[in-house]
Structures are given as C-alpha cells and as structure tokens.
Image (tube, rainbow, N blue to C red):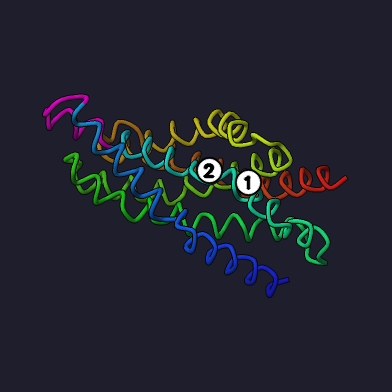
Amino acid sequence: MITTFRAVTARDLKLALRVGGGAGVGVIFFLAIVTIIPFAVGPDLPLLARIGTAVLWIGALLASLLGLDRIFASDQDDGSLDLLLLSHAPLELIAVAKAVAHWIATGLPLVIIAPVLGLMLGVEPRALAAVSLTLLVGTPAVTFIGLIASALSVALPRGGLLSAVLILPLAIPLLIFGVAATNAAVVGEIPFGTPFRLLCAITLFFLVLGPVAAAAALRHVRE
C-alpha cells in the first residue's frame, strides 16, 4: 500500500509540473489578486495593512481552486482511472495520494509565497507568520473538498463549473476562521487558539471525509 501511495503521488507530481498547471499558475494568480487590490482601494497604507491578511486569505483560497476539477478528470481522459479502479490498492488510499500530490504542487507554493506578497500590502511580520500558519493548516482542507467535487464531476462533460459550485460554500468556514485567527494574533481581542483550533477541526474533518466520499463517488461512476 505504501508503494502504491508513493507511486501515485510521484506520478501526479510529475504530471502537474510537466504540464505547467501546478505551482506556477496558482502563484501567478495569487500575485495578480494581491497586485490588483491596491489599485482598487487606493494608496492608503494603513488600510492595506489592516485588510492585507484577509486579502491574502481570499487570494490563496481562490488560487487553491485552480485545477481541483482536474484531479480525477485527467485520469478519466487518458483511461488511467479505470486502471486505478481495478487495482488492488484501496481507492481511498489512491484518493489521498492524489490529493497530497495536488496540494504539494499548488497549495504549498501559496503558503510559501504568502509572506512575500504580504510585504507588498504592508502587513506586519506577526500577522504574516499567522497567515502562513493558518494557510498551512487550511489549504489542505480546500484540496480535500475539491477531491470530493472532482470525483462527483468526473463523468460530467462540464464538471468544472459544478466543482466550483460545490467547493466555494464549503470553503467559506475556512476563510472565516482563517482570517479570524490571523486577526486574533495581531489585535488580541480574542485568543488566537480559539479560531485556529476550529480551523484545524474543519481540516481534520475533510481529511477524513474527502477520501471516503471521493472513493464512493468513483465507485458509483464505475457502476
């Protein structure tokens, strides 16, 4: 099982980097959002610093959505999904491997680049550290939510739109508690641990639910 997990993860990572749909596109999209915001609100540095953490979270969340609908769709297109379904490895394990590979290719670069982009908005270092920590915890949940949506839409000709409709409502709590935890670390009106633990709980919930629901959806498609 460990060998299968490593093989699927390595394969998906190579494919994501080879086709150019991994880290590069997400980081550029993230950069575009952060760059546009100052033009919209004006050169008010205190205002940018105040809303900067929310901007970083919104930008990272939207950038994380890129390519989620292709987690299983690319395998459906080239026929490898049938081989995965017929393999002896648990389908849930395969789903976890594909989600991990997708997060490493798209989510992890966003966590790394977030503090750099935060400097453009004048966000203070303590807030940047909180943003990085909350994104590190929250972005895997987005990937595992997308895992479910991708499995549900794999048999549909226009599944990309369905994926976005399914993912965004479920990702809103991540945005709420992620920004709340970041603001708590800076302002200190409420303890940082309260919203952060809720963010961790949501992520753990989808880490468990995502592979199980995705595997069930794929089995239904096969039938």
**Residue located 81% across and 65% down the image:** 87
- In the image, taking residue 64 as reference, residue 52 lies left or right, namely left
Please, what secondary structure does the residue beneath circle 1 have? helix
Q: Amino acid at mark 2?
A: Val
Residue at image point 55% right, 47% down: 143
Kindly identify the amino acid type of the residue bearing the numbered disc 1. Leu
Q: Main secondary structure of the magenta part?
A: helix
* Number of numbered discs visible in the structure rendering: 2
Q: Which numbered marker is on residue 147?
A: 1
The span shown in magenta is 40-52
| Secondary element at tag 2 | helix
- Report whether 105 appears left or right of 156: left
The percent position of residue 23, horizontal first and vertical second, equals 41, 55
Q: As displayed, is residue 181 above or below residue 43?
A: below
* Residue at image mark 2: 142
Residue 124 against residue 86 in the figure, above or below: above
Residue nearest the observer in this picture, 80 or 87 = 80
Q: Position of residue 166 (x, y in %)?
A: 61, 31
Q: Give residue 108's position: percent from left, percent from top.
A: 43, 56
